[in-house]
Image (cartoon, helix red, strand yellow):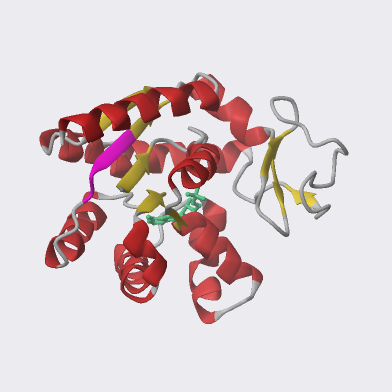
Amino acid sequence: MRLILLGPPGAGKGTLATLLKEKFDIVHISTGDIFREEMKSDSELGREVKGYVEGGELVPDSVVTQLIENKLKKDPSVEKGFLLDGFPRTTVQAEDLDGMLDKIGEPVDRVVYMETSLPVIIQRLTGRRICRDCDAIYHITNKPAKTSDQCDVCNGGLYQRADDNEETIKTRMDVYLKNTKPIIEYYQAQGKLINIDANQDTNVSLDFLINNLNEDAKSN
Ligand code: AMP
């Protein structure tokens, strides 16, 4: 199965992706996670993208598309299927992705659009905390860790993303509305969109999505 998760920052793409990955045993590819890893290791790519990521601006299309192309070509585990989280984010990226997948005859099956309201986004992002070691996602009130600054899974330290502050969240929302929202129509026109109310709990979204995907499987 080849899926894309689309939605504003704070829609819960990462949380839903973690559950879907377990359920369907497919590879989770998050461009944001890859960039943060590269920044942590202070690689050339990490240094190149740092200013964009921390400022909430988009990394140039050519850099992101090249990254995804390499991943899809070089990682044999993607043959089982994949879940793209945070890519594509512009119409150019969506067209490039279609081009790449058409070449290998493995088009995207479904695009999940996680619609979310602004107050929910701000509440989720300002309270989000991440484990430095295993990337597990917490929230200070919605999903607190047992010890406030330590991961329940691996005891790693929790941190707040540099771009999860109100000012940068506003930039990210503007960037999303201008660049990423138009992709919804692009996939709608392909008949691939599944709409989810992502204001609700992620487990409710997961059940809804699984029902939709099961219906697809029956009709194929
Ligand atoms: P995310 O973790 O998905 O919220 O992404 C964090 C940041 O990484 C974004 O605000 C961008 O700066 C950058 N980024 C991630 N994916 C992309 C993409 N597909 N295109 C451009 N920039 C991206």
| Left or right of residue 159, residue 52 in this image | left
Residue 203 magenta-highlighted: no
**Could you say where residue 132 lies in the image, as x and y percent from the top left?**
73, 57
Q: Which residue is drawn at 85% across and 35% down?
A: 146
Q: Main secondary structure of the magenta part?
A: strand
Q: Residue at x 45, y 24 (%)?
A: 207
Residue 111 magenta-highlighted: yes
- In which image quadrant can residue 180 be found? top left
| Left or right of residue 4, residue 170 in this image | right
Q: Residue at x 49, y 73 (%)?
A: 48
Q: Is residue 191 visible?
A: yes
**Could you say where residue 172 lies in the image, as x and y percent from the top left?**
47, 42
Q: Which residue is drawn at 80% across and 44% down?
A: 152
**Could you say where residue 206 lies in the image, as x and y percent from the top left?**
46, 29
**Could you say where residue 65 lies in the image, as x and y percent from the top left?**
31, 65
- In which image quadrant can residue 3 be found? top left
Looking at this rendering, what residue extends furthest in the front direction? 218
Q: Is residue 198 visible?
A: no
Up/down of 201 relative to 164, above or below: above
Q: Give the range drawn in magenta.
A: 108-112
Looking at this rendering, what residue extends furthest in the right direction? 147
Image quadrant holding the C terminus, namely top left
| Left or right of residue 90, residue 9 in this image | right
Number of disc labels? 0
| Left or right of residue 154, residue 181 in this image | left
Q: Which of 11 and 2 is in front in this view?
A: 2
- In which image quadrant can residue 73 be found? bottom left
